[in-house]
Image (tube, grey):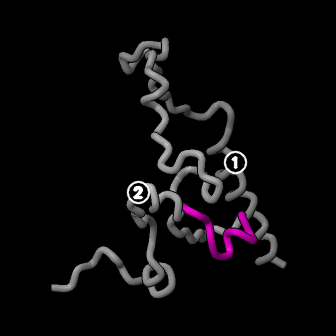
Amino acid sequence: MRSFTTTICLFLLLAAVATSAFSIGGPRKSYPTATTLGMSEEPAEKDEATLEPPVKCPDCDLCDGSGRILGGIGVVLPWWPIKAYKPCPNYIARGGTYERSGQGLDEIAFGRDSTFKKD
């Protein structure tokens, strides 16, 4: 019975220490504001055309304008974290070059680094 009481007391002590770290009256960090960083509070006016990247494949009925068509499991399960894309034929026909991005199968399945170059 004594070890049970000791365990309960130790648990209550640890709980009290842990909750005191999150108390309202505890120390607070001060984060820099826009004025302390020397920034204006008014947003800078920027040309809206420069903010949006150009559409690679405009008016295409096969892709969403990115030049890529979603394939694999991502078509059936949109929440699936791994996406597979293939180039849009309309984008290629218009002279676009498809640039592969992301991780290769060797990286995902086998943990190999695709950027490693053997000498």
Q: Quadrant of residue 100?
A: bottom left
- Relative to 22, is 68 above or below? below
Q: Amino acid at mark 2?
A: Gly
Across and down, in percent, residue 8 comes to: 78, 67
Image quarter hosting the C terminus: bottom left
Q: Residues within 10 Å of mark 2 (few under 14, many from 20)?
A: some
Q: Residue at x 44, y 20 (%)?
A: 46
Q: Quadrant of residue 5?
A: bottom right
Q: Is residue 71 magenta?
A: yes
Image quarter hosting the N terminus: bottom right
Left-right relation of 58 to 117: right
Q: Which mark is residue 19?
A: 1
Secondary element under disc 1, as helix, strand or loop, is helix
Q: Which residue is mark 2?
A: 96
Q: Residues within 10 Å of mark 1 (few under 14, many from 20)?
A: few
Label 1 – label 2 distance at C-alpha:
59 Å
Q: Residue at x 46, y 40 (%)?
A: 54
**Which is more toward the observer, 90 or 2?**
90
